[in-house]
Image (cartoon, rainbow, N blue to C red):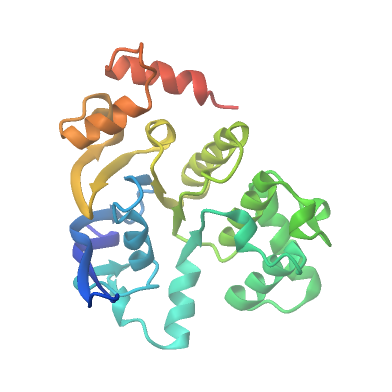
């Protein structure tokens, strides 16, 4: 079996300083999973704030090194990526999407500049017409066009539009993997369905695997192929998304499931499915 991504017994410890002295905090503990090459999927990491899920995302993106264990992408140890050339090659294949689209773009810069810079940086194109063609092609994959966004500043666009532009920017290099850290938590509820539907389209039509980081069980149930549930840095449950969320075994998983149901709803897999179908009907 060839792995696209392999997370092998990964842990992360931070040294924290303060008035009363320094101490060490274990943010991630012994996390393992793998994504197969040639088998695109949406792999979801679920957990509340402080569960370690965003630290795990940063390690996969090679933003911070693991304290122990290893992360390998297409067989290469991510922590061993040092040179600018190797870094660019890795970033071309693994792209991030962050939580707040308004923080992803400088308010003083036009949004099309980010698309053009990405095409030049990762795809080596320099001709203006080719740069614009690649930007427009990526935007059309997320339901926009260059004509709609060209020359516009972030404040002239909605949060949903900005998040779609962020996704389009991530698509320009032609990645095999997208790491999306809470990508719908800062957009209106009415727009969340369209964005998570877009992730499924990227998986099914473009063959892109997505690591979806979230605290939202409703969207996780709707779009995920497999999940892990994290609590205080550890994986407490893992497996097929529908199976785990329909009948969670760990007490923490049960608490998360109960939190997305109304007080009058029976805590059953069918009730959760009905809740999701009502709130996340595909468009």
Q: Is residue 232 above or below residue 134?
A: above
Along the line of sight, the residue nearer the viewer: 201 or 228: 228
Residue at 56%, 60% in the rendered image: 170
Quadrant of residue 173 in the image? Answer: bottom right
Query: x%, y% of residue 94?
Result: 44, 65
Residue 168 appears in the figure: no
- Image quadrant in which the N terminus is located: bottom left
Which residue extends farthest front?
19
Horizontal arrangement in the rendering, residue 106 relative to residue 259 (left or right):
right
Residue at 25%, 47% in the rendered image: 230
Q: Is residue 280 above or below residue 96?
A: above
Query: x%, y% of residue 182?
Result: 46, 49
Q: Is residue 211 above or below residue 174?
A: above
Residue at 50%, 70% in the rendered image: 92
Disc tally is: 0
Which residue extends farthest bottom?
83
Along the line of sight, the residue nearer the viewer: 186 or 142: 186
Query: x%, y% of residue 34?
Result: 25, 55
Horizontal arrangement in the rendering, residue 258 relative to residue 113 (left or right):
left
Residue 130 appears in the figure: yes
Along the line of sight, the residue nearer the viewer: 90 or 231: 231
- Image quadrant in which the C terminus is located: top right
Quadrant of residue 239 in the image? Answer: top left
Along the line of sight, the residue nearer the viewer: 33 or 259: 259
Query: x%, y% of residue 235?
Result: 20, 49
């Amino acid at each position: 079996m060839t792995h696209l991504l392999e997370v092998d017994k990964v842990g992360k410890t931070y040294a924290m300083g303060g008035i009363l002295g320094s101490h060490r905090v274990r943010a991630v503990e012994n996390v393992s999973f793998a994504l197969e090459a040639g088998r695109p999927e949406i792999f979801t990491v679920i957990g509340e704030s402080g569960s370690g899920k965003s630290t795990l995302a940063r390690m996969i993106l090679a933003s911070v090194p693991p304290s122990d264990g290893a992360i390998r992408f297409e067989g290469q140890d991510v922590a061993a990526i040092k040179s600018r050339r190797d870094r660019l090659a890795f970033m071309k294949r693994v792209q991030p999407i962050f939580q707040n689209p308004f923080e992803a773009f400088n308010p003083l810069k036009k949004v099309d500049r980010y698309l053009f810079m990405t095409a030049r940086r990762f795809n080596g194109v320099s001709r203006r017409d080719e740069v614009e063609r690649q930007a427009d092609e990526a935007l059309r994959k997320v339901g926009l066009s260059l004509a709609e966004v060209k020359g516009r500043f972030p404040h002239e666009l909605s949060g949903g539009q900005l998040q779609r532009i962020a996704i389009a920017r991530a698509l320009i290099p032609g990645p095999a993997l997208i790491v999306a850290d809470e990508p719908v938590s800062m957009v209106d509820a009415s727009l969340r369905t369209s964005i998570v539907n877009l992730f499924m389209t990227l998986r099914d039509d473009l063959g892109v695997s997505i690591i979806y980081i979230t605290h939202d069980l409703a969207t996780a149930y709707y779009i995920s192929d497999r999940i892990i549930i994290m609590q205080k840095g550890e994986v407490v449950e893992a497996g097929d998304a529908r199976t785990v969320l329909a009948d969670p075994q760990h007490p923490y998983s049960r608490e998360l499931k109960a939190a997305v149901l109304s007080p009058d709803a029976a805590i059953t897999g069918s009730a959760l499915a009905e809740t999701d179908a009502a709130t996340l009907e595909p468009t």
